[in-house]
Amino acid sequence: MAASAPPASDLEAQIAELTTKVHELKTSKQPFQAEQKQLGELKRALNVSQGGGTKKESAGKGKLTLKTPKGTKDHGPSATLMRKQIFTTLEQIFLKHGACTIDTPVFELREILAGKYGEDSKLIYDLQDQGGELCSLRYDLTVPFARFLAMNQSTYPSIKRYHIGKVYRRDQPAMSKGRMREFYQCDFDIAGNFDTMVPDAEILCILVEALTALDIGEFTVKILDGIFQLAGVPADKIRSISSAVDKLDKSPWEEVRREMTVDKGLDGTIADRIGEYVKFKGPGKELLATLQADEKLMAVPSANEGLKEMGILFDYLEIFGVLGYMSFDMSLARGLDYYTGIIYEAVHASSAPPGISTTPAVPAASTIDPKKPKKKAAAAPGGDDAEEEIDESQIGVGSIAAGGRYDDLVGMFYEASGGKKGAGRIPCVGISVGVERVYSIMLAQRKAREEREGRGKETQVYVVAVGGDGLLKERMALVKQLWDAGIKAEFTYKAKPKLQAQFDTCDRDQTPLTVIIGPKELERGEVRVRRQVGKEAGAGEGELVQRDELVEYLKKEVLL
Amino acid sequence: MAASAPPASDLEAQIAELTTKVHELKTSKQPFQAEQKQLGELKRALNVSQGGGTKKESAGKGKLTLKTPKGTKDHGPSATLMRKQIFTTLEQIFLKHGACTIDTPVFELREILAGKYGEDSKLIYDLQDQGGELCSLRYDLTVPFARFLAMNQSTYPSIKRYHIGKVYRRDQPAMSKGRMREFYQCDFDIAGNFDTMVPDAEILCILVEALTALDIGEFTVKILDGIFQLAGVPADKIRSISSAVDKLDKSPWEEVRREMTVDKGLDGTIADRIGEYVKFKGPGKELLATLQADEKLMAVPSANEGLKEMGILFDYLEIFGVLGYMSFDMSLARGLDYYTGIIYEAVHASSAPPGISTTPAVPAASTIDPKKPKKKAAAAPGGDDAEEEIDESQIGVGSIAAGGRYDDLVGMFYEASGGKKGAGRIPCVGISVGVERVYSIMLAQRKAREEREGRGKETQVYVVAVGGDGLLKERMALVKQLWDAGIKAEFTYKAKPKLQAQFDTCDRDQTPLTVIIGPKELERGEVRVRRQVGKEAGAGEGELVQRDELVEYLKKEVLL
């Protein structure tokens, strides 16, 4: 970055803001051409600031490029604090349900990740072979969890755990929508041999409690169990057919049908049955009754079984009081290799593209699986690192949580490592909350309320000197007394600070109180306490308080 | 891992425990041969379980090795909870001092890390070149922080920030002492142009407050400013001489002197002056007075200036009430390239090898810089991945925190990226707490108190069914009511659970309370509440409580 150019992170923030604005203007059918032009200029500036598509060349000239790697970013104080608040909110829910947490390494042996992510395996980051083991950065938190369980069968035959951590995918980043190459995931999983649909129901209950606690607005949970069994897809074709149906949100039905029958050899009548089922969406119990009234369907044993299980799940969800949030959606499919049963995803009201509602009866054509970012068109010229041009105003935030049952993953690890066949099976069901999407929604809502940017720190008191020779040692003694009393306090490290500079710092940091000391007050054993924020802000010189009663005064009168 | 072999992580835990025991026996001069033999067996077992030195071969045979990469490990529930408690304790101190936190990516552009770590640069993990930018895992949190500041000069001309995160070093791991290839660091830094020694004093105050709050026992902080200036080392030789003196903890003085004079061309009289100074250790003010009484020394302008600054620092530390923790130690040196002024490290009472005390007057020959792990003898046969045989009983835990002033790092980035010379300088001073060492000490102390392993979860109530048909739906309805009231509650996912199995789960998880429901109680609108832990544990059938008064009862009477 040259001294004259604004930092890339500032530009990115401006671009994100302007993208949202253009989107809003378009949605409300207002003119948006001026804003779109400005957006283009900013994007070009960003390209220059980041060295554009010629990074390697400029690096060759010996000038250092000050930036974070493509698809990653620094989170500043208020962004980090907001993420921490999201984590704490989710953690409180998980702890309420008796969860523990574990912490696995950020990289795994490469062979552990191999064959778990289908086509997306190409997005895995590998560590360089520097002698020794071959490793890769984790792609999600699910596979490391299954590896952990397979290694510790005797200690954890069952476990309820959450894990909040960063995961890594070499995908085309889309900053303004929060899709990055490094991003947080927040997973909650229940592992163990239990009765049908009981842990599944608790997971969905937790999902509803968590999204409600985050207070980000309305959402719907789309669930599905065993559509392909219902339709009569042979067991060995379920994965490939599921991956085809997963493309329904971006390809027309005809194309998907062609892939299923021509490419993947599925019987045409079964394909057509799928085509019928994927239209079914709606409140669970009604849809279930419709399906169960279909005699032809109920004659298929697997369909009969599958629908019975859905009935059990709906009963449990009703007891937990969360059935109203559910939509039975037979168009739902997941691209990952390891899912084996029920799958679900939560869709936020803001997720649909402009003009498309998220009410259950309408196809939510734009939902994005957080565990499987959408592939975009071919990369723009400029090589792997050029930012892609995507009109993101046409894409919603996507699903904000997704998960499902993966009963075979732990056993697969166990057996592949030489364990006795069948002995190491631990069925699992889990949910992953898309932290970055939740963050984007929260930020947009905060901006919509035109709130000031959140505080990045929690300082309660700023100690200010008036006159004297800066009173550095007196300020130090006072602030130490406050720290020892557990009060969050700061002072300036300047020996002879200007009065206005000290008050400016308080304003910038939104520090609620100042304690002011001057030579006269000190002589009389007094200090002044002044409110800096709120309706009494800056009222005169503040209140006189005895120096030796200050801590008690702050604790009792002001910091309550 | 074969089904018959115990998991590697169990073995590692047993090895760590036995290593500690052997160490204790040796220290207290008791026989330890039997334990040492057992230790050898376990280590061989671990080698087998991990595929020993022939991992690549066995992988070739198609059998998966279930383990985490070398030098990394999974942290289970109670270990993760204990680390979280360490983080929270430290965070509370940092927040009290008005700090914010930022979050930078786990990998950086490779050129950002280049040239910052001297000889240790070879320990950096590189990401594979998969097209695009060349990246490496971060080696510490300091260099990314400086890069962040250089990129965001206008937004953060000064900042007080902490950052807790994992860092990565391809060093020879030593599990039992908590030295890993992936480990947490917890950094606190103050950046900005301020008056001499003011932020430095606050950093040292925070260090003392943090180590005191962690409650891990006695510690000493060794500090030093400008020994080489005092001795008259030319400015361009200070780095290489510092790196030589840093070897004093493992090489004799004669060898270090030879390196300084013969290899690095230092004047012999200056080397001898250093040799004299490194003997000086002790309480700050007395030592300072001794040095200031040395007329020859005070005639050197740089020495005069350096000692004046130390005097100012000691004054401030006295005001903050932490001077008593400090030891002025002229043998202290740091191997990192970026330090420019005052340096310090905190040494825990348990850090010295057996028989060597940590009182300031005695050389602490075994202290280990957490930012610069010690190099060991050549790797054992078996290649890069074979575990090394180190007699760790002869090594202390090492320093538990270290830091110093690095005034030029931000400016270096700024100028290297094309910024105007001198315009981007932001002086910094910081401290890094060795979280893994603190954790090791806490764990050893907990074990010494023979405490039961800490809980990994916080469940308050377990809902138990007696008789009936398992009462699954009734348990679900009850537990949901508790969740909605904010009570941390669990139930088993079995439809028809055995009574004893339910109580066994409570015992294992140390859950304090059970709420017991049976058909008769339900009919009468009652439940039983029973204490499972503590002195009233398991008293009979528990207390009868009206079902509709249960939540209030639990909140008021029992969960206080």
Image (tube, coloured by chain):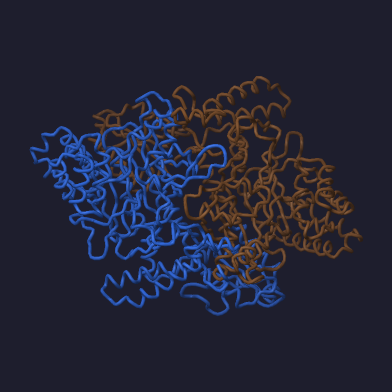
Chain colours: A brown, B blue
Could you say which is closer to the camera, residue B36 or residue A278?
A: B36
Determine which quarter of the picture holds residue A532: top left
Residue most extreme to the bottom: B540
Q: Position of residue B158 (x, y in %)?
A: 38, 33
Query: Vertical placement of B113 versus B50: above or below?
Result: above
Q: Position of residue B448 (x, y in %)?
A: 36, 69
Residue most extreme to the right: A295
Q: Position of residue B462 (x, y in %)?
A: 59, 68
User: Can residue B267 be spotted in the picture?
Assistant: yes
Could you say which is closer to the camera, residue B521 or residue A161?
A: A161
Determine which quarter of the picture holds residue B419: top left
Looking at the image, which residue is at 29% across and 77% down?
B31
Query: Vertical placement of A491 versus A52: above or below?
Result: below
**Could you tell me which quadrant the C terminus of chain A lies in?**
top left
Could you say which is closer to the camera, residue B97 or residue A526?
A: B97
Query: Vertical placement of A389 versus A101: above or below?
Result: above
Q: Position of residue A417 (x, y in %)?
A: 59, 65
Q: In the figure, is residue B446 to the left or right of A199?
A: left
Query: Vertical placement of B362 versus B143: above or below?
Result: below
Question: Number of labelled discs?
Answer: 0
User: Can residue A549 be spotted in the picture?
Assistant: no
Q: In the figure, is residue B242 to the left or right of A223?
A: left
